[in-house]
Image: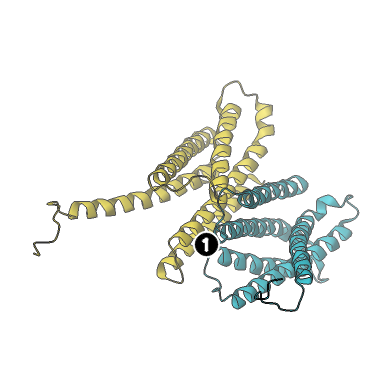
Chain colours: A yellow, B cyan
Amino acid sequence: MAPNSRSYQVSATPFTVFGHLLFIAVATLVFVWLLKFREAIMAYKTIPGRRDVQVQRVVHLTLQTIALGSGILGIVSVFKFQDEAEIPDMFTLHSWLGMIAICLFGLQLLLGFFSFVFPGAESYSRAGYTPWHIFGGLVIFFLAIATAEMGLLLKFLRLGLFRSQEALIVNFIGLLLFLFAVAVGLSVVLTRGY
Amino acid sequence: MAPNSRSYQVSATPFTVFGHLLFIAVATLVFVWLLKFREAIMAYKTIPGRRDVQVQRVVHLTLQTIALGSGILGIVSVFKFQDEAEIPDMFTLHSWLGMIAICLFGLQLLLGFFSFVFPGAESYSRAGYTPWHIFGGLVIFFLAIATAEMGLLLKFLRLGLFRSQEALIVNFIGLLLFLFAVAVGLSVVLTRGY
């Protein structure tokens, strides 16, 4: 070994392994987040039977709460990362729409909780709020999808991608995300007759 | 006048005026396009009366055809501009989703024409296709909105905007576009009971 080469006396292997594990963790988190979010919206379709409305409601609320938590965790991570990398916050349309989406999501969850779960809610006011809850949920969902598409575009540009394999993969993620949004929209429309 | 300054023997005034006119033309075109598109989707709500279904249909078809024509004209202009400026075509997610949106729009118009206008269409097959036509229209509309938001983000980044007055204006256009999409969605949902 060349005597002039700097030696840190520490093997690179554990960090390489840790790096790969981190990558798998991030990828898994993205998929879990998408899966939870999808399942949460579609809980009333996925869980069969008209008698199990109470179960459907608990599953829907639980998954949406996990989704909101994951979303907030994601945004906190972004702020932390941008703070450390000295990238300024909240100046693109992506960040604006993303922040609006997460705030509306929190509001939607709160309104939904007090309308459908809290014991004091009257059944006729529930029935009146339901279509607005569904419409609001779809608006927030499509806002989140649009924000994610813009996020993919930002990443694409900041990485300087262009007609490479990586560029194709990023764009195909964007295409799949659009198809996913169509599937969720169709599922909601067909389930509720809305 | 300084003798060393290069003189083209042509006044700059007509070009300045032409430049301003071009700017007004582009701005007007964007607004006309949005207005036509909005009016086209909302024609069944905007034009009152249940007896005037035939009028509503003609207005809807006419405006959507103008919208498709404007969309194709817009895309042709982009290709022409990028060709002249030697910017490569069709590599961002913005371009992919935009191209898919315009192709689906053309398909939707064609299917709609043969289902609702062409004399051979049976009335029961019309009734069966109507909810799919509305769902398809909303999907294409929201795809167009997402593409426009990505277009604003691209322009923002390529102009190198950052916390300036211009940056705020671009982002507020994006916010208004989102509110506009919510209004159109709500209008369709409330009109059709869909």
**Residue A95 left/right relative to B15:** left
**Residue A190 left/right relative to B50:** left
Residue drawn 42% across and 71% down?
Answer: A164
Q: Residues within 10 Å of mark 1 (few under 14, many from 20)?
A: some
Three-letter amino acid code at disc 1? Leu
**Residue A145 left/right relative to B16:** left
Q: Nearer the viewer, residue B87 or A177?
A: B87
Residue A175: x, y in percent?
52, 62
**Quick one: SS at disc 1?**
helix
* Residue B115 appears anywhere in the view: no
Residue drawn 44% across and 46% down?
Answer: A33
Residue drawn 41% across and 69% down?
Answer: A165
Q: Which residue is mark 1?
A: A175
Q: Give the quadrant of residue B104.
A: bottom right
Residue B180: x, y in percent?
71, 49
Residue A52: x, y in percent?
52, 36
Parent chain of label 1: A
Residue B100: x, y in percent?
60, 67
Residue drawn 12% across and 52% down?
Answer: A9
Q: Nearer the viewer, residue A128 or B156?
A: B156
Q: Nearer the viewer, residue A59 or A73?
A: A73
